[in-house]
Image (tube, grey):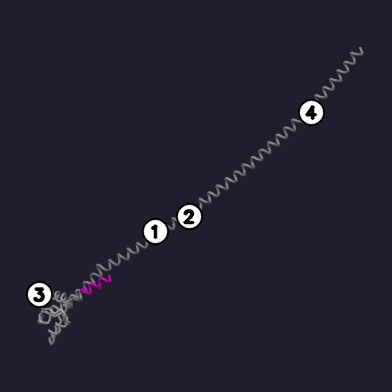
Amino acid sequence: GERVLALLWVRARTLLNNFKIARLAVDTPFGPVLTSARPGRRRALVLARICAGSGVRHAYSRRWKRGNMSEGGSTVLFDGLRAASSGNAVDVDLTVFVLVALFLFLMWHLNRALFQPYLSMKEERFSRIQGAKAQAKDMAEQAQKTLDDYEEKLTDARQEAVAVRTDLRKSAKETEAEILADARRELDEVMSKSRAEIDAAVDEAEAGLHREAENLSELIVTKVMV
C-alpha cells in the first residue's frame, strides 16, 4: 500500500510539473530557447505533446527535422524556459490547488475503498493461513501422540500375552507333574495291596496243602496198619 501511494504521488508531481512547463511554453517564445542535449529530446517531445498550442509543437518538430537541435548543448529545458520568461511574474493558477485537492480526495477515497479493505483482507488471510497451519500442526501432533499410545498399548498387550502364555505353560507342567505323581501313588498303593493279597493267598494255599498232606499221610498210615 505504501509503495502504491508513493508511485501515485510521484505521478501526480510529474503531471503538475508538466502542466507548469506547458503554461510557461505557451506564454514564452518557446522555439528559440528550446535547446537541449540528446537525452533532452524525449522531454521536449513530451512537452510538445502536452502543450495546447499546435504552433509550438509544429515549430519544434520542424526544428528537430532540420537538425537545428544542438547535440552537445548543456542548456536544459527548464533553464531555457526561465531565461525566456525572466522578468515576468509567474501567476499561480488555482488549478494546481484543485488538482492537489482532487489528489488528496482520491487518496482518501482509495484508502477507504481499496487500500484498507485490501490490507484487512490480506491480514485476515494471513491470520487464517497461520491458524490453519497451527491447527494442522496440532492435529499432526495429536495423531502422532495417538499413534505412540496405540503402539505402546500394543507392546504392553504383546508382553502381557507372552507372560500369560508362559504362566499357562508353567501351570500345565505343574498340573501334569501333580497328575503323574498322583497316578504313581495310586499305582503304588494298588501294587502294594495286590502284593499283600497275593502273599495272603499263597500263604493260605500253602497252609491248605500242608493240612491235606498231613491228612493224606494219616490216611496212608491207617491203611498200612490195617
In-front residue for pair 102/58:
58
Q: Which residue is label 1 attached to?
A: 136
Above or below: residue 111 compared with residue 150? below
Quick one: SS at disc 1?
helix
In-front residue for pair 207/123:
207
Query: Which residue does the image show at 25% across and 69% down from the upper left?
Result: 112
Q: Which residue is label 3 attached to?
A: 65
Q: CA distance from mark 1 to mark 4?
A: 94 Å
Which contiguous range is marked in magenta?
1-11
Q: Which residue is label 2 attached to?
A: 148
Q: Position of residue 154 (x, y in %)?
A: 50, 50
Closest to the camera, between mark 3 and mark 1, is 3
Closest to the camera, between mark 3 and mark 2, is 3
* Residue type at the position of mark 2: Asp
* Residue type at the position of mark 1: Ala
Q: CA distance from mark 2 to mark 4?
A: 77 Å
User: Could you tell me if residue 202 is visible in this image?
Assistant: yes
* Residue type at the position of mark 3: Lys
Q: Position of residue 1 (x, y in %)?
A: 27, 70
Which mark identifies residue 200?
Answer: 4
Query: Which residue does the image show at 52% across and 51% down from the upper left?
Result: 155
Instruction: Identify the residue at the far left of this view.
Output: 55
Query: Which residue does the image show at 35% across and 62% down from the upper left?
Result: 129
